[in-house]
């Protein structure tokens, strides 16, 4: 197997409001750096192919599939994982609506919703529909998830 | 994980990127240019490619521009598809870009990456083919500006060490009447059975296709037939189908006969809509 340079590269990023530095392989994938080096196992490995959305995190407040991002690309960026949204409004509303079954996909859905709130604080039905298509729930809790997300964007 | 190591570079100028490529190539490191990286990561993870060096283009200012300069829309190759759709400088391109992958993935996929990818569909190129865009390409001999029709023949034909920096599109094309259809087997996310993008210019309909053959294309012959208004529409479409530039894709998304059926319907819808505008 070809391997040209096993040098480690320094990366500094802000993860859940804490500045972290780490030395990584250029080929390291952000999802596994978060899980294996920082113990942030809330971001899930699903398809590893950018299809399912269970690994979704926020990079500079925007949703990103961490299985399709090199860790080195996160240098200088703000990363938010599901651990950074503990007791957040989005998390609480998902719980209130029981918008999950097995829960494996739930962190990805919550991160995507948080990102949607960041980008479109007043998202309409169509925008919500388009954004939610980025995540897959194999238990098919879509009805409850949709209710939760609508609740998030309903003016109180 | 990616089962091999590579070197990583993030040059801040076009010149540096090109020089780095030459240097790394001369060292036998099989460098690749990297923008969104989704296809490179996917292939590297399965060990289908083994680049020895990755040159990330995202710090090059020219690759991130998006705006009107001297009556032309300039879009940098590293502009993401979601940024493109959000800014919406070219509605047909925005709508076509919105059909690629899903919203989160489009935060990573770039215009240049989509056009230069190896995947069959590369739908973002369709509006640029219709708008006769110009491609700004950088290489060891400097920067060249060429018509998209000279360099996009089934795929973007770059010389060794070249990369796409920007696309230029005349402002005139941005507001022409258009339609965009992406027909999938099921659902709203995924690869197309057929994608048709079309513009109406001077009472003529211009069409471009993805998902039909194993490459995106625009065909002058097909457009000539489809615009022959003295012939009944069904006959025009039959003639247009006979002029496809390759065999129809037959895969898990859809069989060739089914794709052909969907293509005919989509062509008819396209003509009906644009003939009224």
Image (cartoon, coloured by chain):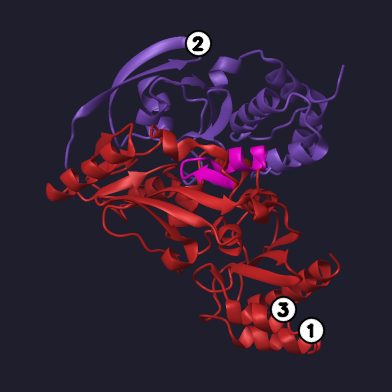
Task: Report the side of B78 relative to A136 (left or right).
Answer: left
Q: Which residue is mark 1?
A: B229
Secondary structure category for the residue under label 3:
helix
In the rendered structure, the residue with mark 2 lies on which chain?
A
Q: Chain letter for red?
A: B
In the rendered structure, the residue with mark 1 lies on which chain?
B
In the rendered structure, the residue with mark 3 lies on which chain?
B
Residue A17 is labelled as 2
Compared to residue B117, the image places residue A31 above or below, namely: above
State the extent of the magenta-drawn residues as a range.
B72-88
Residue B183 percent across, percent down from the top left: 69, 64
Residue B264 is labelled as 3
Q: Chain A, which colour? A: purple
Compared to residue A138, the image places residue B223 above or below, namely: below
Secondary structure category for the residue under label 1:
loop
Task: Report the side of A40 relative to B261 (left or right).
Answer: left
Location of the C terminus of chain A by quadrant is top right
């Amino acid at each position: 197997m070809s391997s040209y340079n096993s040098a480690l590269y320094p990366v500094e990023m802000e993860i859940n409001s804490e500045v972290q530095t780490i030395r990584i392989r250029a080929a390291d994938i952000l999802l596994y750096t978060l899980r294996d080096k920082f113990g942030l196992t809330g971001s899930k490995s699903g398809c590893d192919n950018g299809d399912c959305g269970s690994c979704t995190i926020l990079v500079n407040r925007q949703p990103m599939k961490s299985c399709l991002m090199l860790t080195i690309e996160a240098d200088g960026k703000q990363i938010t994982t599901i651990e950074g949204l503990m007791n957040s409004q989005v998390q609480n509303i998902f719980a209130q609506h029981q918008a999950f079954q097995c829960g494996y996909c739930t962190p990805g859905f919550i991160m995507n919703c948080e990102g949607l709130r960041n980008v479109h604080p007043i998202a309409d039905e169509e925008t919500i529909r388009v954004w939610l298509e980025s995540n897959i729930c194999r238990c098919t809790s879509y009805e409850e998830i949709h209710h939760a997300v609508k609740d998030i964007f309903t003016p109180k | 994980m990616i089962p091999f190591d590579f070197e990583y570079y993030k040059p801040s100028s076009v010149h540096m990127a090109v020089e780095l490529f030459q240097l790394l190539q001369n060292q036998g490191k099989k460098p690749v240019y990297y923008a969104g990286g989704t296809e490179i990561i996917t292939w590297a993870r399965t060990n289908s490619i083994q680049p020895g060096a990755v040159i990330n283009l995202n710090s090059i200012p020219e690759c991130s521009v998006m705006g009107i300069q001297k009556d032309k829309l300039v879009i940098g190759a590293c502009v993401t598809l979601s940024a493109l759709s959000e800014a919406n400088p070219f509605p047909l391109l925005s709508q076509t870009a919105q059909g690629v992958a899903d919203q989160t993935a489009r935060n990573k996929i770039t215009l240049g990456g989509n056009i230069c990818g190896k995947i069959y569909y590369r739908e973002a190129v369709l509006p640029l083919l219709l708008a006769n865009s110009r491609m700004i390409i950088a290489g060891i001999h400097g920067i060249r500006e060429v018509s998209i029709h000279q360099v996009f023949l089934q795929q973007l034909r770059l010389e060794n060490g070249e990369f796409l920096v920007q696309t230029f599109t005349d402002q005139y094309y941005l507001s022409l009447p258009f339609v965009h259809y992406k027909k999938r087997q099921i659902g709203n996310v995924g690869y197309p059975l057929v994608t048709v993008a079309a513009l109406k210019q001077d009472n003529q309909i211009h069409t471009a296709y993805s998902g039909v053959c194993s490459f995106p294309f625009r065909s002058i012959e097909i457009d000539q037939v489809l615009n022959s208004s003295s012939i009944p529409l069904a006959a025009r479409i039959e003639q247009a189908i006979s002029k496809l530039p390759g065999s129809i894709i037959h895969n898990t998304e859809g069989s060739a006969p089914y794709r052909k059926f969907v293509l005919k319907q989509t062509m008819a819808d396209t003509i009906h809509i644009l003939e009224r505008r």
